[in-house]
Amino acid sequence: MTLIKMNPKIKFFILRLKNASFSELIYRFKEKYFLFWLKSFGKNKVFKKPSNLKDQIERLNHISLPSFSINPLDKERLENRKIDANEISLFEKKYKNTFFAKIKETENPDIRIVWEGGRLKDIIHLLLYEKKRESLNVSQDNKTFAKYKILRWIEENPFLMGPHYISSMECALRIPVFFSSLKMIEDLTQDEYKSIINAIYQHTWFVSKRLSLYSSLGNHTIAEAVGLIFGGALFQGEKEGKNWLKKGIKLLEKELTHQFLEDGGPIEQSLNYHRFNLDLYWLSIDFLEKNQLHNCKHWKQRLVEGEKFYKAFQMAGELPYIGDSDDSHAIAPGINPKRDLPEFDFDRFTTFENSGYTLIKGGDGLFLIFDHGPLGMAPLYAHGHADALSIILSKNGYLFLIDPGTFRYNGVPEWRKYFKGTRAHNTVTIDGQDQAIFETSFIWSKPYRTQFIKMEKIKNGFLFSATHNGYQRLKESVLHKRTILWIGEGNFLIKDTFSGKGIHEFELNYHLHPEVEVEKEADWLKLMRKDSKIFMKQIDGAQFELISGQEKPILGWYSDGYGIKKKTTTLQCKRTGQTEEISFLTAISSTGSINIFEGNL
């Protein structure tokens, strides 16, 4: 039986073993034994709980919450998410009294959407907006409703029972919510205090036993560390609590230079998780320093570099959906932790060498992002997309050439493969294959390597190029090189060339934002969105085929939020022939007039 035909769960297990070190194998064995112990003996035991509620409440009174800022919510985008609340409710009820490790994977509903409600973000909204009640005209009943919701959730989700305990990260993200509820709801009874404090203890204990380490390192690890810090702060009067606090701080210190590369970019190659991780760190820093639990001064410079990286991509106007995104927020949509940041200045031409991105601001309102970075974080590359040498283009703050987004993680394997794959990005696909091998929803093998090989200033513009070797794994190998010539203020050429062996099919795709309208004007395609326009064409006279909402094979789709899928238009040009004889030369112009200096390419 090949890995391709194997049961996905078995395949995932084998691939994880294949990529595991000896130390990780020992850790995984201990983790499996822990789950066996919990299932067989531990779930019915009475876990140690705080012995003196009065002491915990007294300690709580001396701990300050971190500061938050409240921003307008993107309500339209949130409301467009395809979430069947009734389906989720039925699923939760079905498994309410089932030990979490016995819950089998299910295709519907998507477990990530099930977990969304368990993050209790609506409670944070109620409590924080209540603090701004006078200016935001929020009902006086919000605190009462928040108290009702959090106590009801604890009652309806007994410890270790049901789907909301499957993920350690999900448990960790609830701990700051529980903590904030204790601080912000003034009329809690002794029993209500006890219920929430016990939930914090149980969640923190559970997270400490199931940390995402080794090949599972990533945003899960950061979230779990934050949970340990908040839980440890409440129980710091006990040895166990001190250990949680110490472990959380140690994890954040260790992962700081791992998750954020030297140029500030994310090792996971995902903008959404980059924002998520940054905010988790800022949340922890403010909490730790306010309560004199740790001096985080030496963390901040790396985070400032991370913020500078993120800010650079915001110059596009609409933030592109690079890499995986599940719309995660460290606190809740529209609510951010305190960030003390300097003003950032950017040159017209900016390259992030470690992360592998080059950004150019044109004087004509054009903004180009060129991706020459790695696939993602080894060894699994879980949240990376196979998008080497892809470009993203905006004009006047509106995206024209897009990254496709994510859509969903679970239950739709063909769509998951498409949105992560090469065909969904603005680059060249060879022989219909991705630049790396898609093994499972969160595992790539045969990762490519990219090389940024040239950047120079020329008269009236810039010239830069890069290669990737993802198709050298083919029986007759191919190396893809993309060269971009920026001419004047609003014109550039993109030349794709190939070296290697054999006859192959080469497929060039450019994906448009769903709001972009396309018209033919002379030998150009005129792309229009709002009051902005750009022009595109193939220089050698070849014509783009326009494809929208195609399902077999999948092409022409866009996701601007988790669970959202929209039809869009893809411009496609295909060629088949000897590798060395194939090339694509694409012109993009603000005016539909461009001087061709192909000799420079």
Image (spheres, rainbow, N blue to C red):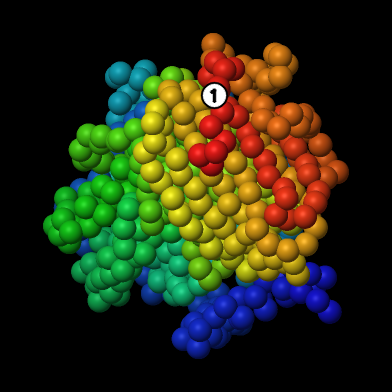
Residue 460's x, y, as percent? Answer: 40, 28
Element type at marker 1? loop
Around disc 1, counting alpha carbons within 10 Å, would you say few (fewer than 14), some (14 to 19), or many (20 or more)?
few
- Residue 539: name its quadrant: top right
Q: Residue at x 42, y 54 (%)?
A: 355
Q: Residue furthest front?
A: 599
Residue 139's x, y, as percent? Answer: 40, 23
- Nearest the eye: 67 or 282: 282
Residue 545's x, y, as percent? Answer: 78, 31
- Nearest the eye: 466 or 199: 466
Q: Is residue 459 left or right of residue 82?
A: left
Q: Name the residue carrying label 1.
A: 595
Looking at the rendered structure, the kind of residue marked 1 is Asn
Query: Number of marks in the image?
Result: 1
Which quadrant, please, contains the N terminus? Answer: bottom right
Which quadrant, please, contains the C terminus? Answer: top right
Q: Is residue 449 left or right of residue 276?
A: right
- Nearest the eye: 126 or 416: 416
Residue 142 appearing in the image: no
Q: Is residue 46 left or right of residue 518?
A: left
Residue 494 appearing in the image: yes
Note whether 69 is above or below 419 in the view shown. Answer: above
Residue 207's x, y, as percent? Answer: 44, 67
- Residue 529: name its quadrant: top right
- Residue 293: name its quadrant: bottom left
Q: Residue at x 62, y 45 (%)?
A: 496
Q: Is residue 360 left or right of residue 230?
A: right
Q: Residue at x 18, y 59 (%)?
A: 298
Note whether 275 is above or below 249 in the view shown. Answer: above
Q: Residue at x 55, y 22 (%)?
A: 594
